[in-house]
Amino acid sequence: MRTFKLSAVLAALLAAPALVGAVLPIPHTSAPTRTDRTMAPNPATGDLSTLALAQRVPMTNAQRLARGLAPNRPRFNHAARRGLAPRASAAPDPNPCPTMTGTVRVAGAGTSASTFVSRVPNVFGEYGVTTDAANALLVQYANCAGAASADLVTLNGIADFTYLGGITGFSSLSGDLGPGSSMYAYLGGTSQTAPGATPQAVPNSFTFTTGIQEDVESAIWTLDRTTGVLSAHWSNTDRSTPAISIVYYAPENFLLLTGNPAAFRTTYGAGSVVTLTFVEA
């Protein structure tokens, strides 16, 4: 009959946890890098921060001051834009660029006739669309003479990031857009960047919600005064400026910029080219 020494059994039992620890190390988690991200246009929903929204109807200066808030940004006197004689003044106009306020209509495959850019972003801080006119994003456009592109300031959207700008895509391997790739940039809330600037590492709505750093450009818009069509522009890191299409990604309700809509659609399974039109309020 086979016998065992009690001391040998105890020694084996005590050694077991160490062996388990040796073959099953505690996993280490970190933010995904550009080379290990899966081919999805957004990261997995997880521990996302919530963005604050501005009021649906922007407050007047009196209402803001009564709540201890700073006054609204000054607006340009519309008389000059409408061709009326400017009011005589001893001081120069502090806002010499014509400014218009309105909503942005979205037209394209898969959208109805009354579709607008929504003031309410998706969970990643990206602007999508709505058919509820009451929830349309209200924007302000300042067209300075000689400027190749300008900002769209949001008045009732994401409270802390008040420029409708481009944010480099989570699965894009770089901030460069062009006809030869599926690289893309979300439309979201951004900080301000200079016209013609390459992607900048400044605060934005996507980075705020996800904790993942993405770069932005804000002064990317031009407005056709005859048709109201808004065109988007993008400056690559080498300062090239590719032709840009605006695309709507319905599965996650966000708008994006890309240099190759077909390549984006092939890579991510959806995406319709749309036209944005400024509708003056």
Image (cartoon, rainbow, N blue to C red):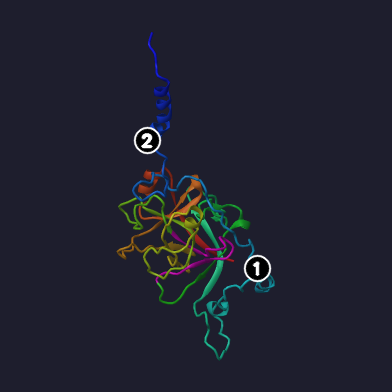
Q: Quadrant of the N terminus?
A: top left
Residue at screen point 47% across, 45% down: 44
| Nearest-to-viewer mark from 2 and 1 | 2
Question: Counting other residues with Cα less than 10 Å from the Cα at mark 2, is it few (<14), some (14-19), or many (20 or more)?
Answer: few
Residue 53 location (% of width, % of height): 59, 59
Q: Is residue 159 magenta?
A: yes
Residue 75 location (% of width, % of height): 57, 75
Q: Is residue 176 magenta?
A: no
Q: Quadrant of the C terminus?
A: bottom right
Which residue is most to the top?
A: 1
Dot 2 and dot 1 residues touching (CB under 8 Å): no
Q: Is residue 85 above or below residue 243?
A: below
What range of the chain is rendered magenta? 148-166
Q: Which mark is residue 280?
A: none
Residue at screen point 47% across, 57% down: 207
Q: Is residue 60 above or below residue 176?
A: below
- Asked which quadrant contains residue 102, the reply is bottom right
Spatial CA span between label 2 and label 1: 61 Å
Nearer-the-camera pick, 21 or 254:
21
Q: Amino acid at mark 1?
A: Met
Residue on which the image places disc 2 = 22
Q: Amino acid at mark 2?
A: Ala
Residue 144 location (% of width, % of height): 46, 75
Residue on which the image places disc 1 = 59
- Dot 2 or dot 1: first in sequence order is 2
Q: Which secondary structure type mostly characterizes the magenta part of the structure?
A: loop
Residue 214 location (% of width, % of height): 42, 57
